[in-house]
Amino acid sequence: MPAVQRANTWEISDSEEESDLNKPSSSSSGEKKRRRRTQEEVQEEQETRRAAREKQRQEKNKLKEEKLEEQQRRREAAVRVSLFKPENFIKSLTLQIHAALLRDAGCDVLLGTLDGLQWKNCIENQGLPNSIIWTRPALQTEDEAKNGVIEEDQVLMVISHNEFEDMVMSHKTETNQSVPIGVVYEEAESLLQHLYKYLTEASRKFVTVLVISHQQRSGSGDEDHFDFHLSQHHLDTEALYWNVSVNFLFGWQEVTDHVVAVTKAVSKRPYKVLCGEPDLGFCMDGSWSAGVRVDRDGRGLAQVWTRQIQQLNRVSPALAKAVTSVYPSPSLLLQAYEQQPSEEERRRLLADLAVVGGAKERRVGPELAGRIHRLLTSQNPHLLLD
Amino acid sequence: MLDANMPTDQVCLGRKRPVPSCPNPLFLQWLTELRDSAKEKGLKTQYVYQKAINSLKKYPLPLKNGKEAKILQNFGDGICKILDERLEKHYRENGQGPQFSADGSDAPIHLAPSFQRSNMASSKQMEAPTNEPSGNLSEHMKRTQREVRKEKGTKKKREYVPQKRSGGYAVLLTLYRHAQTPGSKGFMFRNELQTEAQPLCEKSFTVPDLGSKYTAWSSVSTLIQKDLLVKTHNPARYSLTDQGLALAEKLDSEETGMAKEHVEQMSEEEDARDGPDVVDLTLEEEEQEEKERCRSSKSLERPATALNVNQARGQISESDAAGKSQTPETGRTAMGWHLPPGSYDIVLCVDVIETTGGSSGRKQELVKELQRNCVTFDIRKLNVGDFLWVAREKVTPVPGQLRPPVGKELVLDYIIERKRMDDLCGSIIDGRFREQKFRLKRCGLRKPIYLVEECGSAAAHLSIPESTLQQAIVNTQVVDGFFVKRVQDVKESAAYLTIMTRYLQKLYHNCTLFCRSRELEGDGGDESEQTANLSCSLMAFTEFNYGAIKNKCQTVREVFARQLMQISGVSGDKAAAVLEHYSTVSSLLQAYDQCSSESEKEKLLSSIKYGKLKRNLGPALSRTIYQLYCTRGPLS
């Protein structure tokens, strides 16, 4: 670029003396030549300046556009993510209720509740008899199957007490014929057969059988009840094998409550899977994880600091207080460490601090002192403290 | 004013009779020296010596030797041997004979301390290094060790060398050799290390000697303290430090250089920190020898360890890699063993807590019901879960031994957490509920079951609304993926456990079970293996239970994250995001130091991205964290 070496505008003038200073070793060039050169140069400079300005403007625009694009992308991502949020995701679910359930008038309770919650639902003739399943459109991340409709893995089967007893009976006869667990008969006549067929054909379903009774629930002293529950255990091993859970409910309201609970649970899953919890090696929930409010001036940090010491294993509040009352900030403790002449003494700095009000500890002790020192000074994040 | 009754020469206050001088000044002096030396090093043995000193001071009679001193309180074998050795040395220097006996009657023994000290000094010179090459070890290994240490030079920094075939020795050597193999990962896991080091160690790493709770493994903590070994990560990984590497290299060359001898092993554990076979640096060299001699005279030759380690190391490594045993029927190799059909029983394990306590005695009812149902069960401490099943090797009692040998156990994939409705309430309120589920999910067993009891009973007196409880149970099934079994009462719980036990016994009737090492192979298994009901590749119970300990060792990183979360507004994902940039406290502090202004420090963390949406951490939290770590004075 010819103008690279150009001096600033005001350094160039038409006057001879000044231009003498700036121009490279001037030979005996005449005045006229210099002027012309200067004029040409000025023109060149102007052009390059214009070009530079234009370039700057373009770059600025580009940045602006990129920023807008970025914002747009973020907004879209946020929208996508918010679709996964339970309160939104639940709207994409459709509860499919098998027509057989309509035979029972009590089913109105369920339908009425679903409508009241404005959850999509429909009646289906096909599928597992007496079942309630959840369907929804496939997400971007999922493989589309069956016209892009996905069936959730949770399945409910609502049957009456009598129907359940039949199930148990027929299962008993089957097992008495020493059929190995998991083998299914060809004809699917009884509800049990239907269930078996469904389980073998569908992949990875979790069926909960809701046994609805309209009698008062009796205490376990009741004879029939007792025997019944015992005989039900024959199903247990099958149930475990097939991942079938059984729940005894009283009345359609309880069934409805259960359906609502499962729906809510199902709606929680995608968001959890999407965002996930960071695996830092410990459970994020727990009484320890409630934070301390800190205001803009840092008030509250003293309590934070004490709670921080408590995060180590086997540290009681009294023990933590013993440390932080003598060193009321991390910085003070670190300064104290620095003043120690040796590593050994740094490790033991806190060991003899007295603990007030502790259950069994009278002093901080060398073990904990060492752990705290290691925690604050180690450069290896994976170093084990204990 | 003098009282007429008092002697005119002086006023005596206090004791009216003069204190007799100690009849055993030499012993007193030596013990005092030992105590002071230990005190300097901050060791607990200073108190041991102090107690001995106190007793000695009270004793009015002269003692001939250390052996005699044993009658005194706080004089154990160790100290007595030390004193005898010192005495012996003292005689060597000053000649023996009646005029040199230990009692106070003859002067030279109890010469002025200055004389003693100069003698000691000269004695050190007498034992100048003989320049024996360290490789030339025979039964004088101990002395050579001492000389090796002397060769290293300074009296101050004594090098630590573990006894041959001690726990520390075996561990160092194993890690070294492991690191030399091509493609080595550079560290070893606990079980792996124990297994491979066992052949090199006289004492068992897993089974403590009778009357003690320590095994050879306890020397590992000493190795860590001496900065030869470092323990990181969860699950724990052991690797050599540079010093450890150097030492291990030396040990390795010695080992391969000399003929393998059976050296009698010491098995006394005086100080848990020191470990049984560690050279005790608190003592002077002569004393150390004495201590070792003392130990050796005490100890018996311990029989070989519980594990039958007939296999050459090479074979063990192979079977490690394969995960399956290549040895014949007994399958008792250290790793990669198996249980052929018929060689084991399926046994229900009941957690101790499930059988004790409870005001209504309901817990005992469970056990009674199980007994009534004739279920084979075993009560033990489970670190996670309330019930599970193990495949326990059938063992026959050995004639002459009261207790039959411990059979090997593999844990089946099912694990049950039992919850009564009131328990469930309580655990939801105090936050244990989620944490328990978290631990169950991570324990390595693939089929967790939630056994909910008292489902039918009136929920009137529970502290949480019924709907919330039901939602919690449903969530456990739907979101956490646990199998949920609802029962009415304890009797039904017992019935369920009974049915399950019989089912599993039938299921595994003809199966060969293989031991899978979780630390080496991970949780692995593809989808099909995970859903299969019949898994034959199972974890050893010991590994499982150890891995499920509640308050596990914490890493620096982990604690730092928890510490950050103590600030309101710092959630798990925010803490994780900060950790991506600064994984330790010190690295964050360093970063602050490198900032050129307070303002820069304040904003250091504000643009850290967290979460799925990559949001900014923000200036407020950045400022709070800055205030926490950079405030020079006290916090408020």
Image (spheres, rainbow, N blue to C red):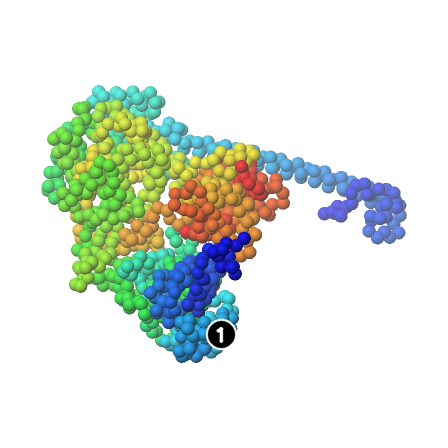
Q: Position of residue A300 (x, y in %)?
A: 51, 35
Residue at 24% x, 24% y: name it.
A252
Q: In the rendered view, does A23 fall on the left or right side of A180?
A: right
Q: Position of residue B172 (x, y in %)?
A: 40, 64
Subunit ID for the residue under disc 1:
B
Q: Give the amino acid type for the residue marked by disc 1 in the picture.
A: Asn
Residue at 78% x, 43% y: name it.
A8
Q: Which residue is identified by label 1? A: B119
User: In the depicted view, which residue is nearer to us: B533 or A221?
Assistant: A221
Residue at 31% x, 62% y: name it.
B204
Dot 1: element? helix
User: In the depicted view, which residue is nearer to us: B98 or B246?
Assistant: B98
Up-down: is B37 above or below A241?
below
Q: Quadrant of residue A224?
A: top left
Q: Quadrant of residue B88?
A: bottom left
User: In the depicted view, which residue is nearer to us: B413 or A118?
Assistant: B413
Q: In the rendered view, does A240 fall on the left or right side of B117?
A: left
Q: Position of residue B414 (x, y in %)?
A: 25, 45
User: In the depicted view, which residue is nearer to us: B479 or A12?
Assistant: B479
Up-down: is B479 above or below B139?
above
